[in-house]
Image (cartoon, rainbow, N blue to C red):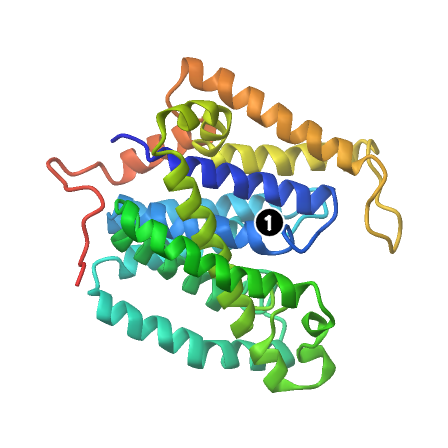
């Protein structure tokens, strides 16, 4: 199957954004948005794979990797378990008609968000009420599945949605930059918690603005990569994005080694500033260089190849399977 290079570029931008958020400090652009972009792209990719057994196995493997990375000596909220939930969810949903998907999406938005906020007020449940609330992450996965169905191969639709999503994302950035973003459930208002634009809160505005920003980036990358010259110039990003799991895990391991070896130290009660910016740039450059060199010799990244071997062993690909085909209307 030929890779869709625009998606690889978008994946690379998501990884770079998360590295910047983890190491160089969050900004209105890097706080929350890169992780959501990663989540939406997981929905797109799962829609392309469109094989229930293989998606469920892939999702379980992502959860296992995420759980294994959690205890390491780093300060990063690992996203892979939530990504695994997305992949499993799409494995269960991808054959549904779009009308049914939209009903599920509306239910998750109108009922799931208040339920999630209520749980957050009363309980501390991993995945449900944490940094990556599962309700919001499944919503992002369904958004990705809809992108796969209706935007992925239509430049005309991409151009239309590009402007629309940019407008919504711009409103989100303006709100994010203002004091309203800090009004959330912690201030004692359940309604404000449900509406919250706070990144990672899973509030309605957070979901709307984050999803819009992700759609904008994906459409922009797809359109840019239609130009052969631009596509070639973006090859380092394409290479890195084609092995996004390897890049993400390498980032977590690098930070863990640096913290364990006291190469970087978190000041108590303060956000890391010192050499974290240099470490972030070094990590990004190292991953880009590694990806380019690795792709010269191999088709897939190390972890991507390992995942493929395991999945093929447990759920061999069916012959003559129409990849990415699910219910559409």
Q: Is residue 100 above or below residue 31?
A: below
Left or right: 240, with 185 as reference point = left
Q: Nearer the viewer, residue 212 or 62?
A: 212
Which sits in the foreground, 231 or 34?
A: 231
Single out the residue that lies furthest toward the top.
Answer: 297
Compared to 268, does 273 lie above or below?
Answer: above
Q: Is residue 262 left or right of residue 16?
A: right
- Classify residue 32 by image quadrant: bottom right
Q: Give the camera-side residue of 91 and 173.
A: 173
- Residue found at the far left of this picture: 320
Estimate how packed mark 1 is, as few (under 14), some (14 to 19) or many (20 or more) residues with alpha carbons within 10 Å: many
Residue at image point 78% right, 37% down: 276
Q: Is residue 56 in view from this perspective? A: no
**Location of residue 222 (image quadrant):** top left
Task: Please tell me which residue lies in front, 47 or 162.
Answer: 162
Place of residue 6 in the rendered image (x, y in percent of width and height, measured from the top left)? 39, 37
- Measured as percent of width and height from the top left, residue 234 is found at 47, 27
Query: Residue 182 at what x, y percent from top left?
Result: 72, 72
Instruction: Please indicate, yes or no, whether residue 228 appears anywhere in the rendered image.
Output: yes
User: Would you place residue 85 above or below residue 239 in this image?
Assistant: below
Point 50% across, 64% down: residue: 168
Residue matched to label 1: 78
- Where residue 97 appears, as percent x and y from the top left, is 19, 65
Q: Is residue 75 left or right of residue 147?
A: right
- Quadrant (top left, top right, bottom left, bottom right) of the N terminus: top left
Identity of the residue drawn at 34% across and 30% down: 309
Q: Residue at x 41, y 36 (%)?
A: 224
- Callout 1: helix, strand or loop? loop
């Amino acid at each position: 199957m030929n890779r869709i290079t625009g998606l690889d570029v978008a994946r690379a931008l998501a990884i770079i954004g998360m590295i910047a958020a983890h190491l160089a400090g969050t900004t209105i652009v890097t706080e929350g948005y890169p992780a959501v972009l990663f989540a939406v792209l997981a929905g797109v990719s799962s829609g392309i794979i469109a094989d229930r057994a293989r998606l469920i196995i892939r999702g379980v493997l992502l959860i296992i990797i995420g759980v294994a990375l959690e205890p390491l000596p780093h300060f990063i909220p690992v996203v892979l378990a939530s990504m695994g939930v997305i992949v499993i969810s799409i494995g269960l949903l991808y054959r549904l008609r779009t009308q049914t998907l939209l009903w599920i999406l509306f239910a998750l938005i109108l009922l799931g968000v208040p339920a999630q906020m209520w749980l957050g007020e009363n309980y501390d449940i991993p995945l449900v009420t944490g940094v990556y609330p599962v309700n919001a992450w499944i919503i992002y996965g369904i958004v990705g599945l809809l992108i796969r169905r209706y935007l992925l191969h239509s430049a005309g639709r991409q151009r239309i949605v590009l402007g629309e999503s940019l407008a919504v994302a711009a409103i989100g950035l303006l709100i994010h930059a203002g004091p309203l973003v800090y009004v959330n459930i912690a201030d004692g208002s359940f309604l404000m918690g449900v509406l919250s634009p706070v990144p990672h809160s899973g509030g309605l505005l957070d979901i709307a603005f984050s999803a819009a920003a992700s759609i904008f980036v994906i459409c922009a990358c797809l359109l840019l990569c239609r130009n052969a010259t631009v596509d070639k110039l973006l090859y380092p990003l394409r290479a890195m994005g084609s092995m996004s799991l390897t890049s993400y895990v390498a980032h977590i391991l690098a930070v863990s080694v640096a913290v364990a070896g006291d190469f970087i130290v978190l000041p108590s009660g303060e956000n890391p500033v010192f050499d974290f910016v240099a470490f972030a740039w070094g990590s990004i450059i190292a991953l880009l260089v590694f990806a380019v060199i690795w792709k010269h010799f191999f088709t897939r990244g190390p972890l991507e190849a390992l995942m493929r071997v395991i999945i093929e062993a447990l759920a061999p690909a069916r012959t003559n399977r129409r990849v990415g085909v699910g219910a559409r209307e």
